[in-house]
Image (cartoon, helix red, strand yellow):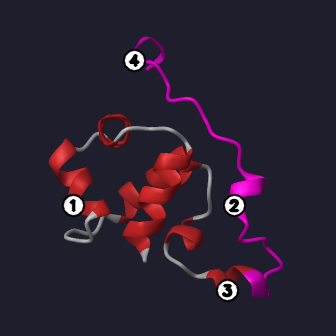
Amino acid sequence: MFSKRLRALRMKRKYTQQIMASLLQVSLNTYQKYEQAERSPSLGCLVRMADILNVPTDYLLCRDDFLISLGVSVDVSLACPPRRPKSRKNQ
């Protein structure tokens, strides 16, 4: 389910896999394996994904029941407008 959410959020934000890989500072192949559920990201990479996609890590990890128990909306499609990737000039 993580891989499906990651892909859906990336596509909603109109990011290519290459853009995500660059923002996460991983190879394109590594990122593709995250979306294909062939590899799991490190904790640090997971946090960066959540920051880039502007969602809680719990949402990426499919912990909807936990979020609801805290009173947090899991409808991220309405709550989180897309971010623009930072250009390399600003980094």
- Element type at mark 2: helix
Q: Nearer the viewer, mark 3 or mark 2?
A: 2
Residue on which the image places disc 2:
76
Q: Name the quarter where the N terminus is drawn.
A: bottom left
Residue on which the image places disc 4:
88
State the separation of the CA atoms marked 1 and 2. Answer: 24 Å
Question: Does the magenta run of residues contain 5?
Answer: no
Could you tell which of marks 3 and 4 lies nearer the N-terminus? 3
Residue extent of the magenta highlight = 68-91
Could you tell which of marks 1 and 2 lies nearer the N-terminus? 1
- Neighbourhood count class around disc 4 (C-alpha, 10 Å): few under 14, some 14–19, many 20 upward: few
Residue on which the image places disc 3:
66
Could you tell which of marks 1 and 4 lies nearer the N-terminus? 1
- Element type at mark 1: helix
In percent of width and height, residue 47 lies at: 47, 57
Q: Which mark is residue 77?
A: none
Could you tell which of marks 4 and 2 lies nearer the N-terminus? 2
Could you tell which of marks 3 and 2 lies nearer the N-terminus? 3
Q: Name the quarter where the C terminus is drawn.
A: top left
Cβ atoms at labels 3 and 2 below 8 Å apart: no
Query: Residue at (76%, 55%) from the top-left corner?
Result: 78
Residue 34 location, quadrant: bottom left
State the separation of the CA atoms marked 1 and 4. Answer: 24 Å
Q: Nearer the viewer, mark 3 or mark 1?
A: 1
Which amino acid type is marked by label 3? Phe
- Element type at mark 3: helix
Residue on which the image places disc 1:
33
Which amino acid type is marked by label 2? Val
State the separation of the CA atoms marked 3 and 1. Answer: 27 Å
